[in-house]
Image (cartoon, rainbow, N blue to C red):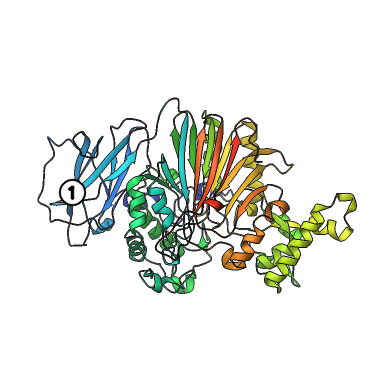
Amino acid sequence: MDKKPDLMRRRIVQGVTAATLLPLLGANLIGCSDSSDRTRQPSVPADFLHGVASGDPLQDRVILWTRLSPERDGTVQVDWEIASDREFTDVVNQGSGTTAAEVDYTVKVDASGLAPGTRYYYRFTCGENVSPIGSARTAPSGLLAAASFAVVSCSNYPAGYFHAYREIANRDYDAVLHLGDYIYEYPADGYASEDAEALGRVSEPANELLALDDYRRRYAQYHTDADLQACHAAHPFIVVWDDHEVANNTWKDGAENHDPETEGDFLQRRAQAIQAWYEWLPVRPPASEQDITYRRFAYGSLVDLIMLDTRVIGRDKQLEYTEFTNGGLIDVDAVRAATADPGRSILGETQRDWLKQALTDSTARWQVLGQQVLMARLVMPEPLVRPLTGGGDGGLEEATAALLASLGAKAKPPEERSPAEQALLDSVIPLNLDAWDGYEFEREDLLVHASQLSARMVVLAGDSHNSWASQLTLADGTPVGVEFAGTSVTSPGAEGQLGAENARLFAPLAPQLVDDLKYANLADRGFLEVRFGEDDVSAQWHYVSDIKQAEFVLLAERSRKVTVSRADMLLA
């Protein structure tokens, strides 16, 4: 029988057609209108307890967002305006519309008629109540000398304070790139919640998120955070989801943290999670099922920003080391064969083709991929991978011994290594099968395509809760681009597993062991700053002092900056 799997992958949510889902994703979008001809209707005053936000900036428009409180029966009228000045003496566009329970009283405006590369100010009004003032910036056009972005991910509310958001709010960037895990789906006593009660940050609702109202309530709680509100009000966000917006380790047909027998149909859960994501974040509603979350932004002649989904829509199920462990050892050959399987995809064929075409069409000086998981090779000898992934019995002690043995073997010239030492180095396998390392064939195919185009590719990643700077290389070692991965806002990194002291000890040793890795921080929370110029790009990691204390400072001594020349794209 002639099967056509690509046609199946084109559906946003298998079993939920685009025709039924897409209208819901744009239901909170209200229109633009001239104040001289709009008809005003009576409105019961509502408050703006969840702040304001902007996002998805284009050269002539930007999405504006808010939410009206409290909930009530029927519809609520809201007015909006956007101006070139904070005093609103020069209003350039305005409009009016209604919202209701169908979209959880959220409101979106695609404010058009704006000038490129310009800062604007916006606000909403309901009755006599006026929202906080937000600041938005459109994408620039034409020749551009510089662009800057703050990069964040993995903001777990009960794990600690959102200090990174506060610091970003006080800085000047073109946009904030949120690479996923904006919320976490766990119950109140779940992951990284041991200090939540003491911090006054116990998750709501108390149960794990399963239904639409659950997800809505969790987004509502996050949006009460003053630091997150300040960051949204200061900058436009460009957002993609990761797994926790749905459930841990999501893939296209399921998730590790979903049991169909007790938690119902996964695809229904995913559809409701996606609906809440579109309601609560300043994301432009998709015009078609193809641009459900992956999309492209042009920053003048300088940057093509290509946002991807490596988690929900096209990903085949992740490999797990439990599948390859026998007698306490990991079968290295079996792992390599599985990760190199040409039938495995992290993007899905539709998105992969779209991405290749976007790279082919790009004429910008930099091609930038904003996505979730690590793309660079992070491979280590099997005796080290085993305890770090839970496959061994020795834990930290075993991992330390394996690390020292591996470093010792690598420090020797090949001719001086013993057979056992060489075998140790020859046993390298991915540390994390959930990242691009678990989809080797597709990664190589993409990197070869970029290399053939002579693309100047910069990949931005989140998800791992740690900081990394890596060279992107083909299987033969040819450099293709660079990857900058940001740490988490609050979710614990390797220090949660190794302890803070050991994580700081391991971090400078990891680049000595992993050829493509040039920098690692495994113990600090914060954000990544990326600045593009015509001839180089720089990445700087900023870390906050303590997410468990209400007051914080930036740890200047731990900040790290790297710069890459466009001429050679080599990380030092």
Pick whichever, 1 or 82, lies toward us.
82
Look at label 1 and name its amino acid. Thr
Q: Which residue is nearer to you in this view: 46 or 84? A: 84
**Direction from residue 156 to residue 368 in the image, left or right:** right
Which secondary structure dominates the residues rendered in magenta?
loop
Magenta-drawn stretch contains 340 = no
- Element assignment for label 1: strand
Of residue 178 and residue 106, the one placed in the foreground of this image is: 178
**Whole-percent x and y of residue 250?**
51, 60
Q: Is residue 115 magenta?
A: yes
Image: 508 above or below 290 = below
Q: Residue at x 45, y 53 (%)?
A: 241
Q: Name the residue furthest front.
A: 557
Query: What span is colored magenta in the figure?
Result: 113-118
Residue 561 position in % (x across, y down)? 56, 44
Q: Is residue 7 above or below residue 204?
A: above
Would you say 388 lies left or right of 51 here? right
Q: Which residue, given by chain and number where applicable, does mark 1 sit on?
A: 125
**Is residue 306 in view from this perspective?**
yes
Q: How many marks overall?
A: 1
Tell me if I can see residue 308 in this picture. no
Task: From the viewer's side, name the closer residue of 252 and 527.
Answer: 527
Where in the figure is residue 354, as x and y percent of width and height? 52, 39
Q: Is residue 209 left or right of residue 400?
A: left
Q: Quadrant of the C terminus?
A: top right
Q: Residue furthest top?
A: 143
Direction from residue 428 to residue 22 in the image, left or right: left
Q: Position of residue 129 (x, y in %)?
A: 16, 53
